[in-house]
Each structure stands twice: as structure tokens, then as C-alpha cells.
């Protein structure tokens, strides 16, 4: 897709029983300083007033600002991938959007300021830190700060930023579409990071928060996106111990092998070393994973990764 003087951002919003917070999120989208956006909302079978709220915004916003489609009703990953892989949605840039956050007014503008420095034919992904807030929008802290450059070796075991912060160009979206929406992966955002980093694209992690990430009982994902990073929590220890993290890696490896042709030679080597090492006995396993260069941030999260590797849970 050619770059235009006024590039459009397709905001990919997935909803499911989101009536409680949806108005606030929609208002934060409307308040964006970057004006050239269009929302595509995929509802995954809501039983509350979500569709009514969306219809009200469609009626009061300018024509074609909001399109509403029905999701596959197979969970949040399938819903987001169904939007990202919808060839009827054509834009210069794309942004994942959750139903219950509050975007900073300059969220899209900051993302576009970086993305427009990258050539159109190079896959590019912007992501950022978040402010964590509770159900009443009271700030409770910040998401973990990552200081190292995002790369494929990191992507194999960690997604450093939430999908709700991600904005990406058409070349990155093409990687998702070429892989197809039926791929079995842990999360749509993690999969995008793997694809872009694996293809040698550009990934920028903004240390400045770009939205208020609401944590509440109805979150479909919430801070579970950082679940290995929260290894010291008892629930997460159980998840790692029972093999959830390893099964997730199994799925990613299978999906990446199907997309092997899109990986750079160096990243194919990293993947091969990772695959070989994780199935060996203890000392060769640790040595092989070190040679693959995989890591997590921050340090205590990487130590959790080492512990998982020791017990062959990686």
C-alpha cells in the first residue's frame, strides 16, 4: 500500500459484553489528536447492550467512521485475527483496540510519528508501556519497563507490550494475513510480534505509557499477558508447572515453522536452536537455550524463564 499525505488508521476493536466501559473507550478514540482513523468493531456475541452502544456511536459519528461486524465467537484471539485478516479493511496503518481501556489523546499521533519513519515495505510495529488502573479508573501502577531492543530471541518467550498499545503498518498486517486467521497461537499480539521480529522488521517499544489499561474481573486477558513475568504469583507457578507455557511455545513453534520462509536466515537459526534445545536433557538444554539468545525482561522475569527451562517447562 502506498503512503498517502493523510494516512488512515484502521482501529481494530473487539467487543464482548463490554457495556460497562465501552462508552469511555469510544470517547477516548474520538478525542484522538490524529484525525484520520476509522473503527472496525467485531462483536463476538455480546448478550448485553454492547451492540446498542456501538450502533449509537455509528449514528452520531460521521459516516463510515464506525463499521460493525460479527466475530467468529471462538475467543478473543480468533476475533482479533478475523479483523486483522479481513481483506475488506484496507489502511496504511492498523491499531488493536480493547473495549475497556482509555486511550491517551496522543496515542495514535505518537505511534504514527515513529511508524512514518519506516519504509512502507518494511514490516513495522509500535508498542508501548501502559498505566494500570482499576475498575474505577484509579491508577495502580505501570506495566513492566523493558529496556532492551525488541527482537526475535525475545519474542520466542515473551511479548513485551500489550496488544492494546500496538499500531502497525500494512506490511506487518500482510504478514498476519498471509499466515491466516486460523493459526493456533497464544495471543494475536504476541503472534504479530513474532512475525514482525522474525521477518527482520522494525519493532519500537515506547517507554512512555500511551493508555490507561483497566484491570477488572471481566478482563478477557488483563495482566495475564504478563503471566510468566508474574512467575512468583502462586497461580502463575501452577500454570507454568502444569505445562501451559510449554504448550504455548509448542503452538508458536508449529506456526512459525509454517512461516519459515518469512524468517531471516539468522532468525531461522535462532528458532532451530530454540526448538532443538528445549527438548534435550538439562545441561544441553540450558546451553542450547543460551546459545539461542532467548531472554525476558526485567531480570526477575528472566530468572523465572531460567527456572522454567531447568524443569523443562519452556
Image (cartoon, helix red, strand yellow):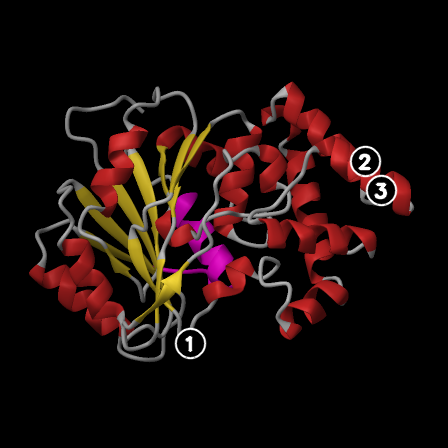
Q: Which residues are magenta?
A: 69-85
Q: Nearer the viewer, mark 1 or mark 3?
A: 3
Element at label 2: helix
The reply, left or right, for residue 151 in relation to residue 86 is right
The reply, left or right, for residue 47 in relation to residue 188 is left
Residue 192: x, y in percent? 49, 41
Residue 23 colored in magenta in the image:
no
Residue 154 can be seen in this image: yes
- Residue of label 2: 288
- The structure residue drawn at horizontal position 89% and vertical position 42%, both measured from the top left corner, is 283
Q: Residues within 10 Å of mark 2 (few under 14, many from 20)?
A: many
- The structure residue drawn at horizontal position 34% and vertical position 22%, both measured from the top left corner, is 120
Answer whether labels 1 and 3 touch (C-beta < 8 Å). no
Element at label 3: helix
- Residue of label 3: 285
Residue 68: x, y in percent? 27, 58
Nearer-N-terminus badge (1/3): 1
The vertical placement of 132 against 85, above or below, is below
**Looking at the image, how many numbered discs can be counted on the residues?**
3
- Residue of label 1: 218
> Marks 2/3: CA distance?
5 Å
Amino acid at each position: 500500500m502506498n503512503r498517502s499525505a493523510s494516512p488512515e488508521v484502521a482501529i481494530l476493536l473487539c467487543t464482548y459484553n463490554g457495556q460497562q466501559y465501552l462508552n469511555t473507550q469510544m470517547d477516548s478514540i474520538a478525542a484522538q489528536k490524529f484525525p484520520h482513523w476509522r473503527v472496525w468493531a467485531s462483536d463476538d456475541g455480546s448478550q448485553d447492550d454492547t451492540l446498542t452502544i456501538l450502533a449509537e456511536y455509528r449514528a452520531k459519528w460521521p459516516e463510515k467512521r464506525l463499521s460493525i461486524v460479527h466475530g467468529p465467537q471462538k475467543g478473543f484471539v480468533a476475533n482479533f485475527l478475523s479483523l486483522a485478516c479481513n481483506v475488506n479493511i484496507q489502511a496504511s496503518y492498523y491499531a488493536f483496540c480493547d473495549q475497556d481501556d482509555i486511550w491517551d489523546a496522543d496515542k495514535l499521533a505518537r505511534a504514527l510519528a515513529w511508524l512514518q519513519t519506516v519504509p512502507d515495505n518494511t514490516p513495522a510495529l509500535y508498542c508501548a508501556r501502559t498505566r494500570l488502573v482499576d475498575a474505577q479508573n484509579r491508577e495502580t501502577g505501570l506495566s513492566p519497563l523493558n529496556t532492551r531492543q525488541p527482537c526475535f530471541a525475545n519474542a520466542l518467550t515473551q511479548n513485551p507490550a500489550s496488544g492494546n498499545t500496538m499500531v502497525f503498518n500494512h506490511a506487518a498486517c500482510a504478514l498476519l494475513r498471509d499466515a491466516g486467521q486460523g493459526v493456533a497461537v497464544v495471543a494475536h499480539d504476541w503472534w504479530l510480534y513474532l512475525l514482525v521480529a522474525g521477518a527482520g522488521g522494525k519493532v519500537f517499544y515506547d517507554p512512555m505509557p500511551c493508555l490507561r489499561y483497566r484491570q477488572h474481573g471481566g478482563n478477557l486477558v488483563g495482566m495475564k499477558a504478563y503471566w510468566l513475568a508474574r512467575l512468583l504469583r502462586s497461580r502463575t507457578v501452577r500454570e507454568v508447572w502444569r505445562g501451559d507455557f510449554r504448550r504455548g511455545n509448542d503452538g508458536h513453534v508449529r506456526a512459525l515453522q509454517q512461516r519459515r520462509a518469512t524468517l531471516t536466515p539468522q532468525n531461522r537459526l535462532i528458532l532451530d536452536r530454540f526448538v532443538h534445545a528445549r527438548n534435550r536433557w538439562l545441561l544441553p538444554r540450558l546451553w542450547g537455550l543460551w546459545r539461542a539468545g532467548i531472554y525476558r525482561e526485567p531480570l526477575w522475569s528472566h530468572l523465572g524463564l531460567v527456572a522454567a527451562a531447568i524443569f523443562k517447562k519452556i
